[in-house]
Amino acid sequence: MPAEFEFPSALAGCINATTKVVVLTGAGISADSGIPTFRDSQIGLWKNYKPQELASIRAFEKDPKLVWDWYRWRRGLIDRAEPNPAHYALKQLEECAPETTIITQNIDGLHRKAGTTHLIELHGNIHRARCLPEDKSLLTWDYKADIPLCPDCGGRLRPDVVWFGEPLPNEELAYAVRCSRECDLFLSIGTSGLIEPAASLAYEALRCGAKVIEINLEATPLTVYATHVFTGQAKSILPPLIEWMITSR
Ligand code: BV8
């Protein structure tokens, strides 16, 4: 039993090679890698802007350079960040329980950097751009240009992320809903659970009979419904908890 945390016996060894596990992560899991969450990311020159206003097609159409500047600033933070023990614990989980699906709201790519393969990026990825005229994703472009243009057609590029008011990618969302409905265990990690439709996944899992575990720094709307709640940093709680759920007998 880890000295620092008391984990319930009900979770001891509850994960094996056939357990269907779904994990939903939010910005909180990357906060331990030094990437500020939305609610605390507006520091310095960005303190006069609300993220939900900048992460919108309206802001982009009004001032595309400002929005690209914001994403360049965030990408600078992200490219200096490394996965933390919480990301690696999920990689270990995926190795021990191959039926694990990691669903992230984050656009920082840290799960993939930690080696996670069975990953759904619901809100896109900051390392991709999308050509507006051709509606295709690009992995390389001149992202230092004030307003980057498509190297193929010369059309305007935008960050390949889902902005507020935009639909999530159909296939990814449908797959995330199906996994949440079919899982035995749902972990909600480092998310305020305020952004829809991602926030509804935990309730789908509950409705379909799954155990739901929440790990977060603060209470969220999910807290009162979760089967188990662990309040604290994901990087401190998740590694021993996954160890407990996989190895304890
Ligand atoms: C859509 C990419 C429909 C961009 C992001 C009901 C149903 C459907 C939609 C809505 C609905 N009600 C309202 C809506 C609209 C809206 C919405 O949800 N609004 C909210 C404000 C109510 N949803 C949308 O617009 C979505 N689109 O539904 O379209 C549609 C359908 C058809 C046709 C047209 C339209 C799109 C939402 C996606 C927006 N894009 N990201 C970018 O990143 O630039 S969302 C973005 O903000 C993040 O991805 C994240 O998901 C969200 C919140 O960010 P954070 O606050 O940073 O993170 P999080 O909430 O995860 O909180 C961090 C938590 O971690 C905190 O609780 C903190 O305590 C904790 N923490 C901190 N440190 C740690 C920690 N925990 C553990 N350890 C730590 N160390």
Image (cartoon, rainbow, N blue to C red):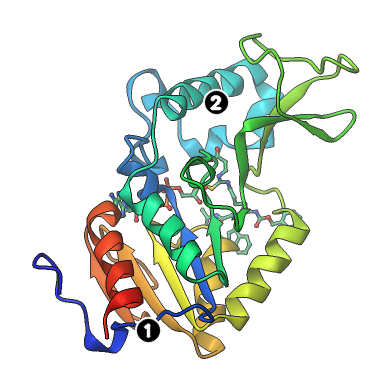
Residue under pointer 2: 71
Q: Foreground mark, 2 or 1?
A: 1
Q: Quadrant of the C terminus?
A: bottom left
Q: Is residue 8 left or right of residue 161?
A: left
**Residue at coordinates 39% horizontally, 34% vertically from top-left?**
82
Residue under pointer 1: 14
**SS assignment at label 2:** helix
Inspect the image, locate mark 1, and give the three-letter code of the amino acid beneath it.
Cys
**Residue at coordinates 56% horizontally, 59% vertically from top-left?**
103
**Residue 37 locus on image (x, y percent):** 38, 42
**Residue 226 locus on image (x, y percent):** 36, 79
Q: Quadrant of the N terminus?
A: bottom left
Residue 25 vertical placement versus 56 (above, below): below
**Residue at coordinates 46% horizontally, 45% vertically from top-left?**
114
Q: Is residue 93 left or right of residue 65?
A: left
Work out whether residue 53 or residue 146 is closer to the camera in this orientation and state it: 146
Contact check, label 2 and label 1, Cβ < 8 Å: no
Query: Quick check: is the Cβ at mark 2 less than 8 Å away from ligand 1?
Result: yes
Residues at marks 2 and 1, CA–CA distance in whole angstroms: 40 Å
